[in-house]
Image (cartoon, rainbow, N blue to C red):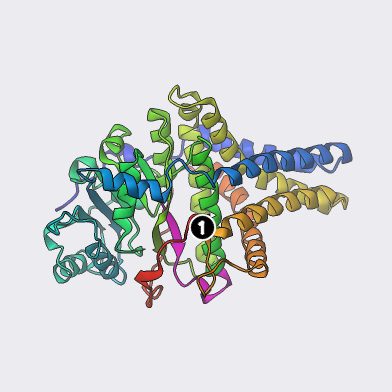
């Protein structure tokens, strides 16, 4: 099957208003940071920032312990349902022949089936102009693993097409899919045989939008991989807490799950979206007021970014995508009558934190010029301290090698590691603002390379952690 070319509106220049706004946010944040060299003002900003951060973090950590849908209630809801939801597993892939056979095998092993063994799922892979035979590899793997009948490959080709995951997914809009629920996976994803069954429980329990728990393969292979693993756990703490508190919880790109009708109502996939996950989150929230449920027991494993340069490029895209989402969809979310006041406030607070790195940059510059370091030290301590505290709390979900809870020393070490790792954003966000302010044309999408080395000995029996 071949996908049609996108409409001209899918390839757009960056609006001048966004560029001006980005420059204003950067300049305003730096100006506040510079002004913090004045003792009274600096103390006020530092204390205010810390107070707001702690005031948000503590209720969020408490809320993670009472999710609206627990794994147990999801499983019970699915068992009571006469007709379980079906899935379309949707994968966008460009030159991913090294990893796609593993994913096809994982999909084929899913136990979400009818009583007579028929799959309650289909697999669609969008072959996005691959030159390594990705489409042929998928077709061969589907034959080998017995799911050829429920597997389709859509070939996307043409000159001048927009790049990126959102653009690839746009070749498989909801009307192309047959499942009740659309699940988006990256080409390097690994899932357990129970994944779809566990995910189905959340939809049986009433959710219409769900995001999976993201895990990192080979997390013990080095500091960088381990830090990314704990970062995903911390991000899960934030999303789970926002969901439980009635906030604007969001999708994460690997493991998006949404009812097909809801996706269609929100306008489907957008080729121009730099970060398709939060773009869709905001469109769905503004239109329907839906919260994204966070499924702790439906886990998607993925390769880590293996180099600092690759991590820098990835996070620049994430940060710029975050600003673009806020500028494009923020007004609709904030004014939506479908959302509660607390949900809109949650959105403002979550987006507002992106201004903090610019303030830190200004405070750091002021410290260099004036020699007064107290303000920047206070800001850094607050930023890293709250991150470390939430990291410590989130690490209750992790397990030691013997299957038990992490020891206190190990948990503290990893909380410190993820806190320091989050300091990476203090450099990434100002640079992303600068890129957006100076960008006149479309964004160039930086694809992450997958080598297939991760998870060679991945154990299907690992299971999901117990609720804590």
Q: Is residue 273 left or right of residue 172?
A: right
Q: Nearer the viewer, residue 249 or 129?
A: 249
Q: In the image, is residue 453 above or below residue 301?
A: below
Q: Residue furthest top?
A: 337
Q: Secondary structure at mark 1?
A: helix
Residue 9 colored in magenta in the image: no
Rate crowding at label 1 as few (under 14), some (14 to 19) or many (20 or more) other CA atoms within 10 Å. some
For the question of whether residue 379 can be seen, the reply is yes
Where's residue 464, x and y in %?
42, 61
Residue drawn at (41%, 73%) of the image: 454
Q: Position of residue 166 (x, y in %)?
A: 35, 48
Query: Which residue occupies 27% across, 44% down?
Result: 80
Q: Quickly name the residue at label 1.
A: 232
Up/down of 64 relative to 130, above or below: above
Give, as a single range, the part of the protein colored magenta. Answer: 212-224
Q: Is residue 159 above or below residue 261?
A: below
Left or right of 127: which side holds 225? Answer: right
């Amino acid at each position: 099957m071949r996908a049609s070319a996108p409409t001209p509106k899918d390839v757009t220049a960056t609006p001048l208003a966004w560029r001006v706004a980005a420059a204003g946010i950067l300049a305003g944040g730096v100006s506040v940071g510079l002004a913090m060299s004045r003792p009274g003002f600096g103390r006020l900003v530092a204390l205010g920032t810390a107070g707001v951060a702690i005031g948000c973090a503590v209720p969020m950590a408490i809320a993670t312990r009472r999710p609206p849908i627990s794994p147990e209630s999801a499983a019970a809801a699915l068992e009571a349902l006469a007709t379980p939801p079906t899935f379309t597993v949707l994968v966008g892939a460009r030159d991913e022949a090294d990893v796609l056979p593993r994913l096809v095998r994982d999909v084929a092993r899913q136990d979400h089936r009818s009583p007579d063994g028929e799959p309650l799922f289909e697999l669609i892979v969008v072959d996005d102009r691959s030159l390594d035979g990705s489409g042929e590899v998928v077709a061969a793997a589907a034959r080998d693993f017995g799911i050829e009948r429920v597997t389709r490959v859509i070939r996307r080709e043409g000159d001048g097409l927009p790049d990126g995951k959102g653009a690839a997914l746009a070749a498989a809009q909801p009307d192309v899919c047959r499942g009740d629920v659309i699940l988006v996976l990256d080409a390097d994803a690994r899932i357990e045989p129970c994944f779809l069954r566990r995910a189905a429980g959340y939809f049986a329990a009433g959710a219409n939008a769900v995001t999976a728990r993201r895990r990192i393969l080979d997390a013990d292979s080095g500091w960088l991989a381990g830090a990314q693993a704990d970062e995903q756990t911390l991000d899960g703490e934030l999303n789970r807490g926002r969901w439980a508190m009635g906030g604007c919880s969001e999708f994460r790109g690997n493991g998006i799950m949404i009812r097909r009708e809801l996706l269609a109502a929100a306008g489907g996939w957008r080729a121009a979206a730099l970060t398709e996950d939060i773009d869709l989150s905001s469109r769905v929230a503004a239109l329907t007021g839906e919260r994204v449920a966070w499924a702790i027991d439906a886990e998607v494993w993925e390769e880590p970014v293996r180099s600092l340069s690759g991590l820098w490029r990835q996070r620049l895209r994430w940060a710029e995508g975050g600003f673009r989402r806020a500028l494009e969809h923020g007004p609709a979310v904030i004014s939506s009558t479908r959302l509660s006041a607390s949900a809109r406030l949650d959105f403002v607070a979550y987006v507002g934190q992106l201004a903090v790195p610019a303030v830190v940059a200004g405070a750091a510059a002021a410290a260099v010029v004036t020699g007064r370091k107290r303000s920047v030290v206070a800001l850094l301590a607050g930023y890293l301290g709250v991150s470390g505290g939430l990291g410590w709390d989130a690490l209750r979900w992790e397990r030691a090698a013997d299957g038990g809870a992490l020891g206190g020393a190990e948990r503290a070490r990893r909380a410190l590691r993820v806190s320091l790792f989050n300091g990476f954003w203090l450099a990434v966000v100002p640079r992303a603002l600068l890129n957006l302010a100076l960008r006149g044309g479309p964004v160039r999408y930086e694809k992450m390379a997958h080598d297939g080395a991760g998870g060679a000995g991945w154990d299907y029996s690992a299971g999901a952690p117990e609720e804590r």
